[in-house]
Amino acid sequence: MPPHNIALAWLGAIVGTYVILFWIAAWWARRTPNDIDDVIVGVVQWPAVLALSLWAAIDLSGRSELPDGVVEVVRRGAGIALIGVVTWCVWRLVRDTVLYYGRRLARRTEANFDDVLFPVLDVLAPVVIIVTGAVLMLRLLGADFSTVVVTAGGAALFLGLSLGDTLKNILGGVMLLVDTPFRFGDLIVIDGVVCQIKQIGLRVTTLYNTESHAEVYLANSILATTKLTNLTRPSPDLKVRVIVPLPDPRLIGPGTELLLALADANPYVLGRPAEKQEAMRRTLQAAEPGSARARELEWGLAALERERELDGYLAEVEQSLTDLLGKVRRAECSGLSVQELRHLMAELNAMHAYPDHLVRAMRAWAQARAADPRLASYPDDRERLLSDAEMRLGALDSRLEGLRKHLHSPDLYQAQRLDDLIVELMEWLPRSFKQITPAWKRPLVQPAHVDLKGVSLQLYVYIDDIHLEGFVREKRVMGELFAEAVEGILALQRREN
């Protein structure tokens, strides 16, 4: 083919690429419901046209009658520019798709690893991509890589000696990435101060001091080696103690009953639902109609009713999984046949009604919790409750779908792991989806001390979610319980006298 025909072919390819990317692909991307295709098309439009133009320059220069020196300069210059364009395009695609959507996905998933991984990748990804592009440019320029390796080794030794603390912090970040003792948004105790995890970087971790309303920047090397107390794990409810003095040892019995009744009547304290509903109704009858206390109790009763419905469906799902587990283990004794797998699949499909009820009940409970009058000034907390429920529902659907896939067409290894998958799901439900309040999380009263100086009772309760109300729910509930307890104890003393 003559050179001018080749030039026309390259020109046609460049114009065709422009038309496809700027007209056809852009028109298609704007009409799709998601936005990731808009981002990809927007990023690759000009780089693709430029890369094709540079490639054409390299090809046409080799076919021309220009002096060899000029051809070599053109080929190397265009090659370096081509590598630069591709490097920039790759970085934009990684930043605007993988990292951007990865961070959004990390907020919705229950895994801890991705909460640490993507902030670290934000720092490492551009370094790796730029260094790779630079190495390719050096190779194109004919650099001696033995010299480059020796120079890099010396530079690495120098940096290792001069930047020891920085490398320790980077290693600490990698350790946090591997161990993941916390995730984004968790509350941890550092030096006796409650802080929230805001961002985990390659060198430092950003914390939010919930007491002083200030950001704290802590080196990863310190965070990776210090003792941490994660208040959010295994669940965001926190056990607290309220100590109430008694003026008379004779009040230990009635005082204990009073404290338990006050705890059950508080909508922010965990307990046995039936007992809490009864205590809250009694308190509501005594409250002034239309008062803030009455509205709070009315909300608490509605939210508790939604929770009881959710717990009922959850108990049915757990019982169904227990029955399915028994059938799987009996079938595995003689090896899972195709007929047995179909029967188990039918059993799992019959459970569809329970997860559907569970989904509706979880959303209803989340909406009821978000209607808390105490959260009227905290819209972020309301959004957090709703998004947290959706994250749990997404994780439940993913686990059930994984179980169905194993039952549809399992290989021998997967078939023998069916019981393990069911057990994992049964363990995950109370741990990460929703726990039916166990007996050990109900209010408990014990004497603190009884001596000549006086008597005290200590009330142990679990407060439902310490993240809410700007992290002050714990202190508010403890203060209210103490004030109500003191007032009630004084009333008991007056009756005794």
Image: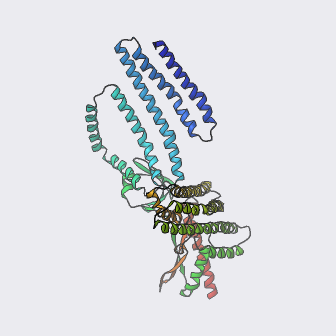
What color scheme is it? rainbow
Query: Where does residue 51 sit, x and y in percent of width and height?
Result: 47, 26
Q: Residue furthest right?
A: 289
Q: Could you say which is closer to the camera, residue 108 or residue 404? A: 404
Query: Is residue 298 shown above or below 93?
Result: below
Q: Is residue 268 visible?
A: no
Query: Is residue 95 shown above or below 355?
Result: above
Q: Could you say which is closer to the camera, residue 186 or residue 411? A: 411
- Residue drawn at 63 percent across, 57 percent down: 377
Residue 238 left/right relative to 172: right
Query: Where does residue 373 sit, x and y in percent of width and height?
Result: 66, 62
Query: Where does residue 2 sit, x and y in percent of width and height?
Result: 46, 12
Query: Is residue 197 shown above or below 243?
Result: above
Query: Where does residue 339 sit, x and y in percent of width and height?
Result: 53, 61
Q: Is residue 195 visible?
A: yes
Quarter containing the C terminus = bottom right
Q: Could you say which is closer to the camera, residue 147 or residue 490? A: 147
- Residue drawn at 34 percent across, 28 percent down: 138
